[in-house]
């Protein structure tokens, strides 16, 4: 039904010869993102608050309010049963619903850069290069609570220092920094005139977020 209404389109076949579907264009992607945001943040005032945190990032390069919002608002929406499918894709989707801006940016998820794939890129559109905002590149990593043998309650009580000292978090952050640095260098080489900010974001379950600029 989604295919016949043009909400999805064919994108080849899998190795098992199953049909592969994808979102056909940026207009439809925007509708998906908007609908996800309405489902996760049903109150208009909360959605407005989320948009302000996004503006802090691409206008001033400050990602902390955005991470705080995801941690304090979005993560409360995800129930314990959602941990069955927990991974960085869910966290990336939460950030994408807040950051999506197809007026200023060409938004891309899993963009191929030097034969590898960046998690989230926000590159100013060619007709928006004069606008004083940052181009954004974010790499996401996820550490399941089961891996560190913590409950959600205990994870929420961790100090920032204790969170960042956890071996699993440190390992994921190091990987994210390496990847986002390489992706950023490739993007700078390709475009030449970017005002690029690079960030590594590591989530501990659906409880805590640690970020670093690269």
Image: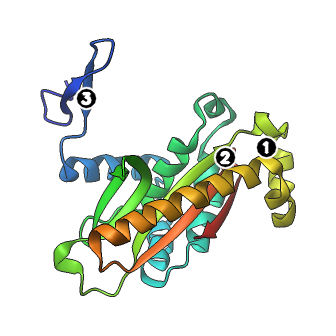
Q: Quadrant of the C terminus?
A: bottom right
Q: Is residue 126 above or below residue 137?
A: below
Q: Residue at x 43, y 68 (%)?
A: 185
Q: Secondary structure at mark 2?
A: loop
Residue at the spot of label 3:
21
How crowded pointer 1 is (Cα within 10 Å; few <14, some 14-19, many 20+) is rated as some
Secondary structure at numbered mark 1? helix
| Earlier sequence position, callout 1 versus callout 2 | 1
Q: Is residue 60 left or right of residue 102?
A: right
The residue drawn where x is 44% and y is 66% is 184
Towards the viewer: 162 or 75 = 162
Residue 201 image offset from top left, x and y in percent: 60, 59
Tag of residue 203: none
Q: Quadrant of the N terminus?
A: top left
- Disc nearest the viewer among 3 and 2: 3
**Could you classify mark 2 by the number of other residues whose Cα lies within 10 Å: few (under 14), some (14-19), or many (20 or more)?**
many
Indicate the secondary structure of the residue bearing disc 3: strand
Please give the residue where the numbered disc 2 appears in the rendered image. Answer: 206
Q: What is the spatial separation of the Cα atoms under label 1 and label 2, in whole angstroms?
A: 8 Å
Q: Where residue 107 sits: x, y (%)?
A: 31, 59
Marking on residue 152: 1
Q: Are marks 1 and 2 in contact (CB under 8 Å)?
A: yes
Residue pictured at 36% horizontal, 72% vertical: 188
Upstream in the sequence, badge 3 or badge 2? 3
Neighbour class for label 3 at 10 Å: few (<14), some, many (≥20)?
A: some
């Amino acid at each position: 039904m989604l295919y016949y209404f043009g909400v999805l389109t064919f994108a080849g076949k899998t190795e098992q010869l199953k049909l592969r579907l994808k979102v056909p264009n940026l207009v439809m992607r925007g509708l998906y993102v908007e609908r996800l945001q309405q489902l996760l943040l049903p109150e208009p005032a909360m959605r407005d608050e989320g948009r302000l945190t996004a503006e802090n990032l691409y206008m001033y390069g400050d990602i902390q309010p955005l991470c705080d919002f995801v941690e304090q608002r979005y993560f409360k929406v995800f129930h314990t049963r959602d941990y069955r499918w927990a991974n960085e894709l869910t966290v990336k989707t939460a950030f994408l619903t807040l950051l999506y801006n197809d007026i200023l940016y060409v938004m891309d998820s899993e963009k191929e850069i030097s034969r590898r794939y960046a998690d989230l890129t926000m590159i100013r559109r060619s007709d928006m290069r004069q606008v004083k905002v940052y181009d954004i590149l974010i790499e996401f990593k996820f550490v399941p609570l089961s891996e560190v043998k913590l409950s959600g309650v205990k994870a929420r009580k961790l100090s920032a220092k204790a969170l960042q000292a956890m071996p699993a978090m440190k390992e994921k952050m190091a990987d994210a920094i390496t990847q986002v640095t390489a992706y950023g260098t490739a993007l700078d080489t390709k475009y030449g005139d970017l005002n690029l900010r690079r960030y590594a974001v590591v989530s501990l379950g659906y409880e805590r977020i640690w970020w670093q600029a690269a």
